Amino acid sequence: MTQTEHEAQQLNEIRQQIDALDEKIQQLITQRALCAQKVADIKTQGGRVEAVFYRPEREAQVLRAVRERNTSLLSDDVMARLFREIMSACLALEQPLKVAYLGPEGSFTHAATLKQFGSFAQPYPVSTIDEVFKAVEEGEVNYGLVPVENSTEGVVNATQDNLIRMTAQVTGELDLAIHHCLLSQTSDLTQIKKVVAHPQALGQCRRWLQNNLPGVELEAVDSNALAAKMAQADNALAAIASEQAAVLYQLRILKARVEDKQDNTTKFWVIGKEKPLASGRDKTALVLSLANKAGALHQILESFAKRDISMTRIVSRPSTNKKWDYVFFIDILGHQFDERVADALKEVEQQAHFFKLLGSYPISPMD
């Protein structure tokens, strides 16, 4: 047997093994789908129409277990993404999830929606963050996904305002690496008269724009995907948007990664009407305002510190109700149903001038 024939025999044997494994994988996925269907049957027996099919805490537990037991050549992230798609497909057999996001298609919020819910969810694009909250509040969708904070530009004010006045609960979180591209119909930078993008994107690319397109007009629009659509229709425009937007709207990528900081990341929150149960690794988000007296904030922080509750985030911003008054957005580790957390929250509420619990949710297993 020649060397070539020997290699061909070895490859054929490995391919037969792969075919056999593929058959087993397919059989197991089929069994999992059948189990998902049985779950749906149990939840809807007796004609129940208000059954809850998507449980964020259960999903987080499954994906954490996937990562923890992974010993393959595939990374934990890759393995988790594969299982995310399997879970998304199986959940669609029970109830396809409709998820509102800041559209149109091709925005970073769209990418975050697919990362969080998988490609078998039903994305529901809307024009503003306000409309995402409205769609959840009015029951048009099961969930919404909104940007909360960017590592370069800070908090997203429209999201913060809606969190204060709306009843929707925070039910999940995820981080998404944000890499901006300069997109246009033209291939000549000198032909660009205006750059359009979401205000956050313009801020995240401010220094690059100043250095490379000095004097070019900048215009803020509702989303980067909308900016891409505008650039598709006007050769004198360039948009700041994603690589996906370049493909969707048939634009040239004049320059990739134009963000000023290469570790540029946006945190997103999932909002919904249900309160997730504890998953074992959770956060709780709240917002409050304090009386204008010495030590007021220290008292709040002490309520968490003396119970050994870690605070992961605190952001202050001016109140929209009273001049020179401030509200504080605070995230802590733990679930509102945990005894220590519940005691701390009760104490904080008594001390606060205004208090609102935004929700408890699983720490993302996908980051």
Image (cartoon, rainbow, N blue to C red):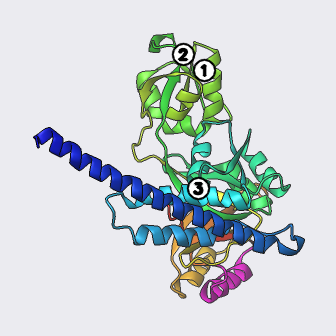
Which residue has dot 1 on it? Answer: 231
Vertical placement of residue 239 versus 137, above or below: above
Residue contact between numbered discs 3 and 1, judged by CB atoms under 8 Å: no
Which residue has dot 2 on it? Answer: 185
Q: CA distance from mark 2 to mark 1?
A: 7 Å
Q: Amino acid at mark 1?
A: Ala
Q: Residues within 10 Å of mark 3 (few under 14, many from 20)?
A: many
- Describe the element under mark 2 as helix, strand or loop: loop
Task: Return the mark for residue 116.
Answer: 3
Between 252 and 26, the one lying in front of the other is 26
Compared across the picture, whether 74 is left or right of 40 comes to left
Compared across the picture, whether 183 is left or right of 277 comes to left
Residue 335 image offset from top left, x and y in percent: 62, 78
Look at the image and give the residue range highlighted in magenta. Answer: 336-354
> Magenta span has 111?
no
Between 223 and 29, the one lying in front of the other is 29
Q: Residue furthest front?
A: 1
Image quadrant in which the N terminus is located: top left
- Is any atom of residue 284 visible in this view? no
- Describe the element under mark 3 as helix, strand or loop: helix
Vertical placement of residue 208 versus 345, above or below: above
Picture residue at 42% right of the left edge, 26% below the top: 255
- Describe the element under mark 1 as helix, strand or loop: helix
Picture residue at 60% right of the left edge, 81% below the top: 299
